[in-house]
Amino acid sequence: MSDTIADHGYIPEEHAPDPVVSHGDPTPPGKIAIWLFLASEIMFFIGVLGSYIVLRSGSPALFSEHALALSKPLAGTNTIVLILSSVTMYIAVESAQKHDRAKVIACLLATILCAFAFMGIKYVEYMAKFTHHTIVARESATGPLYVYDGHVRQEGSTRILKGFRVEAAAIPELNINLVSEETVKEAQAKAEGTEAAKLEEKDYTLPAESSISQDISYGPWKNIFYASYFATTGVHAAHVLGGIVALGLLLAHAIRGKVLPPHIEYVGLYWHFVDLVWIFLFPLLYLI
Amino acid sequence: MTQDRLNHYADEPHAASEPMPHHDVPYMKVFGALVVLTIITVAIGIFMRFENEAVNVLLALLIASTKASLVAMFFMHLKFEGKLILMIFLVPLALCVLLVVALLPDLLPIGDASLHLFNTPRLMQPHAEH
């Protein structure tokens, strides 16, 4: 008996009484631990979703109007990517139990690539929001006040906005936090006497900084819809990043010759849970 | 986590650590079902909007719950787990339902009279004590 309390100050796991096993249940403690962790994660996400529910019920029109501006094709692709990563993760767990190291490495790698693909698409979505501006400005000192809404890019020393523009007076009770691109587009169509569906995005050269009276991007500060959108997808993306770290560690061990079936199973459970959360976030934010 | 600890787990001898008994999960079928359901829910979201917002929400949540159940049952092996793991998963879900139910007074329109009582400070109500 070298592994004793006196030697190490703790009871080595193989000698410690196992409360679960001794009651005839073969569930390993590690698995119970990861499920308890997932239980706490469920409560974490319902907290975030609970505030989303309350905020949405307070401003249903704002939410459904701004949700239209999110990209359904990109988010739909991301959903498929995460589901695919769940399948590769499942095969990785199965291969680990059969000690098929090559397959474990291939599947963990595929899962990590899917995770990076998810984050890449998320980055494109986020950037599309951060470069999207609502701007109130005058072109000249005596000219009318305009509302611009569209994507801003820098060309040399000038800023170009690709989107829509209408006189501020055409939008009653203008509030740059609440107004959406769709509203500006419809007002512009009405002012020009065409239909909104036929109106194309145009490039507008933005006036100098000193002529701009208000400027806001579609970040979490835009309004409570974007606050909810960035908060929910942000905490989910943080979980994906955490998953990438865990998967990367498992992959490094597998490449060095150490396949760890229980660990791969536990990280797999976490990974499927992250997929499961996205399955709910996707329709809640993008589709309804 | 140190290398020692990892070695310890990898070489762990006793049968209790056998990760999970093998079950044949038709994971490609599950994958197919999940992809089909995703396409359906996106198609509904784009082309088949109902006038009644509640119908859209319930339909989207119904499809999401079906997908989530597939992931939990097959990928997370919940279908083959014992009562203990099932309880660890189901109890928080019940608490989630409880939390959302507790939000209902904030979500549903309640009668004018009760709203009036909720929103008016006690001192301003007729016949308040003091």
Image: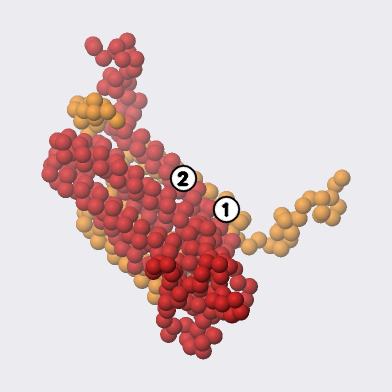
Relative side of A46 to A34, left or right: right
Q: Is residue A138 in sight in this rendering?
A: yes
**Looking at the picture, which amino acid does disc 2 mark?**
Phe
Residue A4: give its label.
none
- Which of labels 2 and 1 is toward the front? 2
- Where residue B115 appears, as percent x and y from the top left, is 70, 59
At a point 24% along the width and 12% down the height, the residue shown is: A2
- Where residue A153 appears, as percent x and y from the top left, is 40, 67
On screen, residue A147 above or below B59: below
Q: Which chain is orange?
A: B
At a point 56% along the width and 70% down the height, the residue shown is: A211
Relative side of A148 to B27, left or right: right
The quadrant the N terminus of chain A occupies is: top left
Q: Which chain letter goes with mark 1?
A: B
- Where residue A152 appears, as percent x and y from the top left, is 43, 68
Relative side of A230 to A2, left or right: right
The residue identified by callout 1 is: B103
At a point 36% along the width and 34% down the height, the residue shown is: A33
On screen, residue A194 above or below B50: below
Color of chain A here?
red
- Crowding at dot 2, Cα within 10 Å, few <14 / some 14-19 / many 20+, comes out as few
Residue A44: give its label.
2
- Where residue B126 appears, as percent x and y from the top left, is 84, 55
Tell me whether circle 2 and circle 1 mark residues in contact (CB < 8 Å). no
Name the element at disc 1: helix
For the residue pair B45 and A244, the one nearer the viewer reads as A244
